[in-house]
Amino acid sequence: MPSNSDDEIYRDLARLLEHMLRSLPSPEPGQVVGFTIMTGNLPIDPEAYGYTDDSSGIDYECVEGNETVFVTARVPSDLRTAPYVDIQPRQIRIVMDDRIAEIDLPVTIDIRHSFYQVRHGVMDVSCRKR
């Protein structure tokens, strides 16, 4: 994969923001809980960004890039069990306790190269297009 100098700048910016957030004094209500910096060529069209608050009670946002579909969800702090994602070729299921969000993807994805992580109250799902 060729290295893009813009991607390196965003990675450096993400590291800088993480360091700054860790260095803040004890957290107070209203401070930054989590953030995501997505690198690469993302569509400019505002209709391509889909924020959804569906009946499952899970707030998520779905963004389709050139090679990847990104889904970001807010993780409540009062969960009894660890949240997880079931990744299928055309759909992902986000499970948080009794709440389940089934998200139909706009394209078929490569399950083997797709993953998710949960950090600082934010779940990031990265699904590579097939």
Image: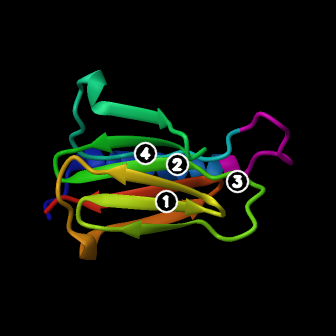
Q: Nearer the viewer, mark 2 or mark 1?
A: 1
Q: Label 1: which residue?
A: 94
> Which label belongs to residue 73?
2
Q: Nearer the viewer, mark 3 or mark 2?
A: 2
SS at mark 3? helix
Residue 115 position, x and y percent, is: 38, 68
Q: Nearer the viewer, mark 1 or mark 3?
A: 1
Q: Label 4: which residue?
A: 37
Neighbour class for label 1 at 10 Å: few (<14), some, many (≥20)?
many
Labels 4 and 1 touching (C-beta < 8 A): no
Q: Label 3: which residue?
A: 22
Judging depth in this view, the residue of 36 and 107 nearest the camera is: 107
Neighbour class for label 2 at 10 Å: few (<14), some, many (≥20)?
some
Labels 2 and 1 touching (C-beta < 8 A): yes
Report the residue at 73% width, 50% height from top. Answer: 23
Q: Within the image, what quadrant is residue 82 found in?
A: bottom right
Residue 99 position, x and y percent, is: 60, 56
